[in-house]
């Protein structure tokens, strides 16, 4: 009995070690980011970086451009997504299920790949749509209907892959509204428009505003789309300007200072979104409520279908068709015919281009390692916070969620500054990319598993502890199996996030540590659209395979949010 009483429980130091690793993972990069922003090359404190940031037009203009870009994307998404969500959730429009599927396809499509697809479609000279336009009206070779290399073109391309965030939030809000509220309005004489204006719209307005803020956030923090479309057009956004500050000669202090305003704006937007989503607008009292009554569109179903085709054609159908066509024809501008079909691009990517195998290997290794380590870290931290097992568990929860407020390009700067000098020099290895991906993808995994823990009563673990198991044994043998579907889904979400990440990778990769996203970006610089299409389609096939696997699992709790 005495031996049992003094038995050493190894779970506590292990749990503390996980907590310490989480703190180092978040605090170390951010502390170096702040340090470099307020020091000069000699390490002396100076405000010069921030003075230059607000006084140099070449640094101030990208910030203003980014704000304008974000407002444009937010406006388009708030005008397009809510009507689309209403048609899917509240009407009898045909093909509603397919609309949801295509919106999901748009959501998981990497925005930089969508930007490249729109390059193929709407480049002023070689774009497929412009070629059709010239052929249809017999115009000269330099006439063009569309030009994607403009500010509006960039706003449009980003909007195609950010409107799903607004759609999902609004559609979920519409699904949660009790039908009794709208039925009561109808019984009291309210027409369809009156009920929508006085009942439905006020109830979903917080979701619309929150989704618009997400769209603003995505537009401000994306690197890939602006790098692909804005740089050829001759202007910078804040993310591309931060990236340019690492080109020769590098200016890490200025890059760190330029990253902090973007980080501050992101925190403010996320905090505002959180407050909006906490506003319910109504409370449900009683038991189950009936399903909402679908509005019969009648002859209006055809304009509704046309609207959906227009939106989804811009984000999925046309871009995917452009990628498929470019992957199998000799030249992107050639028509799709038997004479022009070729397997050269596929052969080049997978058998001739030596960088592909290395990039695929690196991407797979990083995806598996990040998903595995990220899921394990998220599982332990969610366990600690859900069961309140350590002092400061609220701080741990905050740290596990905090990286969602750090734009990918800012995290790339912070990681670069942290691990390119002693005592821990990781630049040029896969380890630095692993740390970056792990930090970026941790919030999605943590939120997924933290929600799942709420569905499991702690009495099961207490019973295991009474029978002699320590906390780690209880977590491994009792809780983890009950969370199996949630754990697998979390692994899938993190894996998808890794294979599509570009913002941080673009600052951290070297010749030996390239991943698929950076290979695609390099190929775009050289204009090899056929090889890009093959690699892009390969990325999409892998992504959709993982999404289908995740969706077939009965996940406990709410779905984890994605990050682009």
Image (cartoon, grey):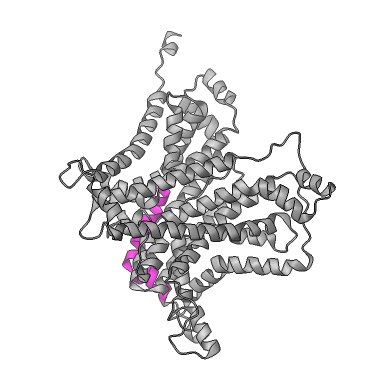
**Residue 520 visible in the displayed image:** no
**Residue 63 visible in the displayed image:** yes
Residue 557 in which image quadrant? top right
Q: As displayed, is residue 164 above or below residue 390?
A: below
Q: As displayed, is residue 7 above or below residue 472?
A: above
Give coordinates of residue 73: x percent, y percent. Answer: 50, 60
Q: Residue at x 52, y 69 (%)?
A: 320
Looking at the image, which is closer to me, 208 or 46? 46
Q: Residue furthest top?
A: 2
Residue 114 colored magenta?
no
Q: Main secondary structure of the magenta part?
A: helix
The image shows a total of numbered marks equal to: 0
Looking at the image, which is closer to me, 226 or 386? 226
Give coordinates of residue 178: x percent, y percent. Answer: 74, 43
Give coordinates of residue 244: x percent, y percent. Answer: 29, 60
Magenta stretch bounds: 345-372
């Amino acid at each position: 009995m005495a031996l049992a009483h003094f038995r050493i429980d190894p779970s506590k130091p292990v749990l503390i070690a996980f907590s310490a690793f989480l703190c180092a993972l978040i605090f170390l990069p951010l502390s170096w980011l702040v340090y470099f922003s307020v020091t000069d090359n000699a390490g002396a404190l100076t405000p010069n970086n921030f003075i230059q940031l607000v006084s140099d037009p070449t640094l101030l203009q990208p910030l203003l451009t980014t704000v304008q870009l974000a407002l444009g994307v937010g406006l388009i998404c708030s005008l397009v997504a809510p009507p689309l969500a209403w048609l899917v959730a509240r009407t009898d429009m045909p093909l509603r299920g397919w609309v949801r599927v295509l919106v999901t396809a748009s959501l998981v499509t990497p925005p930089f790949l969508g930007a490249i697809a729109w390059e193929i479609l709407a480049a002023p000279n070689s774009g497929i749509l412009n070629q059709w336009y010239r052929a249809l009206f017999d115009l000269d070779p330099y006439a063009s209907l569309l030009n994607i290399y403009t500010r509006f073109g960039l706003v449009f391309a980003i909007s195609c892959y950010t409107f799903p965030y607004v759609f999902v939030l609004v559609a979920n809000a519409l699904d949660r509204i009790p039908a009794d509220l709208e039925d009561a309005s109808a019984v009291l004489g309210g027409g369809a428009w009156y009920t929508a204006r006085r009942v439905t719209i006020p109830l979903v307005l917080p979701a619309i505003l929150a989704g618009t803020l997400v769209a603003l956030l995505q537009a401000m923090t994306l690197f890939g789309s602006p790098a692909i479309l804005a740089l050829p057009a001759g202007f910078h956004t804040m993310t591309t300007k931060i990236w340019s500050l690492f080109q020769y000669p590098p200016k890490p202090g200025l890059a760190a200072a330029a990253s902090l305003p973007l980080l501050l704006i992101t925190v403010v937007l996320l905090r505002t979104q959180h407050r909006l989503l906490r506003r319910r607008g109504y409370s449900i009292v009683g038991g189950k409520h009936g399903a909402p009554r679908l509005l019969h569109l009648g002859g209006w179903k055809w304009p509704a279908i046309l609207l959906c085709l227009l939106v989804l054609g811009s984000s999925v159908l046309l871009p995917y068709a452009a990628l498929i066509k470019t992957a199998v024809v000799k030249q992107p501008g050639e028509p799709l015919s038997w004479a022009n079909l070729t397997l050269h691009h596929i052969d080049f990517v997978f058998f001739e281009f030596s960088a592909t195998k290395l990039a695929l290997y690196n991407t797979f290794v990083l995806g598996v390692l990040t998903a595995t380590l990220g899921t394990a870290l998220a599982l332990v931290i969610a366990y600690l916070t859900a069961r309140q097992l350590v002092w400061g568990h609220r701080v741990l929860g905050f740290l596990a969620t905090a990286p969602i407020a750090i734009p990918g390009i800012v995290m790339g700067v912070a990681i670069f500054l942290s691990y390119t000098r002693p005592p821990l020099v990781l630049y040029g290895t896969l380890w630095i990319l692993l740390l970056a991906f792990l930090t970026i993808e941790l919030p999605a995994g943590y939120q997924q598993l933290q929600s799942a823990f709420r569905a499991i009563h702690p009495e099961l673990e207490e019973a295991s502890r009474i029978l002699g198991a320590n906390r780690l044994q209880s977590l491994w043998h009792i809780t983890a199996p009950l969370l199996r579907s949630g754990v697998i889904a979390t692994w899938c979400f993190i894996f998808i996030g890794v294979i599509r990440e570009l913002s941080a990778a673009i600052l951290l990769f070297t010749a030996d540590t390239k991943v698929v996203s950076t290979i695609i970006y390099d190929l775009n610089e050289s204009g090899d659209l056929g090889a890009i299409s093959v690699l892009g389609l390969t990325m999409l096939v892998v992504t959709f395979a993982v999404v289908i696997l995740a969706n077939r699992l009965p996940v406990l709790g709410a779905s984890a949010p994605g990050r682009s």
